[in-house]
Amino acid sequence: MGKTVLITGASKGIGRELAIVFAKQGYELILVARSRELLEDLGKRLRKKYGTDVTVIEKDLAEKEAPEEIFQELKGREIEVLVNNAGFGDYKEFAHSEWEKQYVMIQLNVTALMHMTRLFLPSMVERGHGKILNLASTASFVPGPNMSVYYATKAAVLSFSQAVSKEVKGSNVTVTALCPGPTSTNFEDTAGLVNSRLFHSLKVTDARKVAVCGYRALMKGKPVAVEGMSNKFLVFGIKLAPRGVSLTMINQIQSKLREGKPADQ
């Protein structure tokens, strides 16, 4: 049997593209998402094109018991790579947001990611090899007014990933935080950004490029990977600028986007 990768949020966007990248490299795939129909369709395509083995698990990781259920279902299978990709965002002032949606976002973006890592990391450390890829964001590096909870969850993912990466150093197990900028997925629809012009005002990256960047960084064992030169410059600038300056800049951009104006007005 070949190496096996477990990918959450694999039905669309970056998760789907990562599944394709790993299939090309000969990995056996375990794909997790809420939509069995989309997963089965992707699995069928990958089996036909690459001859890889694909297992589909229909599960909503926003549900508290989901990570443990996935873990129990896969007992006996050696997971070489874990990709924690599942997540979503919401574009709204926090005071007017729906708390249930924010709560589910925290559960999916942070709690489930940490729980999955806690379940699958020990066996990797015990056998002396394994890799984990966690989906963070350029949003991890700065607070984000109008998307405050989303930005906070991504900051948590980056912090957590860097800390665990340091903990397992020397074990031949690596943890990588992938930090894409705005990406062409179904994210903007879920976050309510379709009419905000965010994806018309900012440079949007193709999900395939993000997936390739993530795969390469993962294979090299990099703790953090920022996709694209423009995003690298952005993160570099955020790190150099005083916190208040970067916060004001993000607030101005996202306030204009909320009003439906181009970000450069």
Image (spheres, rainbow, N blue to C red):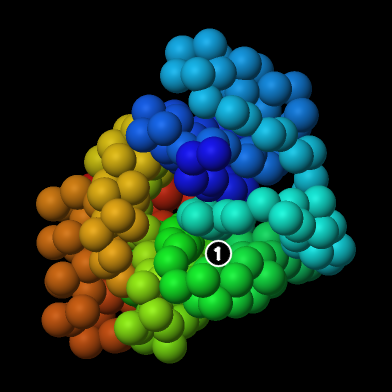
Camera-side residue of 20 and 260 = 20
Q: Please provide percent x and percent y for residue 245.
A: 24, 80
Q: Which percent across, then down, holds residue 102? A: 71, 65
Please tell me which residue is depicted at 15% across the width and 71% down the height of the picture.
237
Q: Is residue 26 visible?
A: yes
Above or below 163: residue 108: above
Is residue 181 visible from the viewing direction of this image?
Answer: no
Q: Residue at x 54, y 77 (%)?
A: 126
Give whichever of 157, 116 is nearer the camera. Answer: 116
Q: Residue at x 80, y 64 (%)?
A: 68
**Mark 1 sits on what residue?**
150
* Callout 1 amino acid: Tyr
Where is residue 247 drawn, in percent x and y?
A: 34, 76
Q: Quadrant of residue 161?
A: bottom left
Report the side of 259 relative to 262 (left or right).
right
Give residue 77's position: percent from left, percent from top. 67, 52
Secondary element at tag 1: helix
State how many labels appear: 1
Quadrant housing residue 149: bottom right
Drawn side of residue 210 relative to residue 58, left or right? left
- Label 1 packing within 10 angstroms: few (<14), some (14-19), many (20+): many
Where 228 sits versus 129, above or below?
A: above
Q: Residue furthest front?
A: 1
Q: Nearer the viewer, residue 186 or 98?
A: 186
In this picture, residue 148 sits left or right of residue 165: right
Q: Which quadrant of the rendered structure holds the N terminus?
A: top right
Q: Residue at x 59, y 22 (%)?
A: 42
Q: Residue furthest top?
A: 48
Viewer-proximal residue among 223 and 254: 223
